[in-house]
Amino acid sequence: MIKEIDKLKAFEKFRKEAIDLLEESKIDKDKFLHKNLDYIRKLDLKPFSNIKNVEEAIYNYQYYNLLAKKSNAEAKNIVNNYKKRKLYARLINERENYYCLKDIATQRILELLDYKFVESYFIILNSKRLKGEIFEINIKSEEKLILHSKNKKILNELKDHGVFLDYSRPSLIDSYVNKSY
């Protein structure tokens, strides 16, 4: 049986390779999300309830972010189906719960790093609904670690620690965040 630490190392290697494929336009956003979901299922590693290090927090962030995006995509497929309104409501609730759990992982990453080597700012989005809501957190001390949130508590903590820039700018992964599903 593969140990948790080995699974985390394998996940981190896979995460970076998948990001490279996306950056090189070898896969699109949908394929990226599907590859990640498939990998996490096969990895058979549950999220960590007591996050002890940055690697565990990154895993939880990715795990919950993927599940949130999956729930959101499923909800979008049935949004106009009156007969499935209860399922739609359940999927939206799941999405919000997963994003909340993702934000817990984000908060833990920031705490573990003591807000060092962090830069954050609102990102310029095509979505008018999300304008001024979503901010990016660039973790400069970790390779390819760019987080997103709209959690006000995290935003205030970033401001309190002096790592939030008070202006909007394009995301470091703009083509990813501005491509809808």
Image: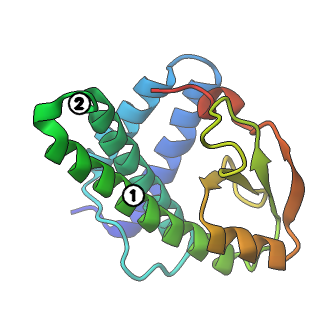
Horizontal placement of 41 versus 133: left or right? Answer: left
Q: Is 63 above or below relative to 32?
A: below
Local secondary structure at mark 2 = helix
Quadrant in which the C terminus is drawn: top left
Q: Quadrant of residue 73?
A: top left
Write the residue at 39% across / 39% down. Answer: 36
Write the residue at 57% across / 76% down. Answer: 108
Of 141 and 99, nearer the camera is 99
Q: Quadrant of residue 106?
A: bottom right
Of 175 and 15, nearer the camera is 175
For the image, the number of numbered tags is: 2
Label 2 Cα neighbours within 10 Å, binned few <14 / some 14-19 / many ≥20:
some
Residue wearing tag 2: 78
Q: Is 30 above or below relative to 83?
A: above
Horizontal placement of 53 versus 175: left or right? Answer: left
**Identity of the residue furthest to the left in this view:** 83
Of 151 and 104, nearer the camera is 151
- Residue 169, can we see it? yes
- Residue 7, can we see it? no
User: Tag on residue 175?
Assistant: none
Cβ–Cβ below 8 Å for labels 1 and 2?
A: no
Write the residue at 65% across / 79% down. Answer: 112
User: Tag on residue 96?
Assistant: 1
Q: Is 150 above or below relative to 41?
A: below
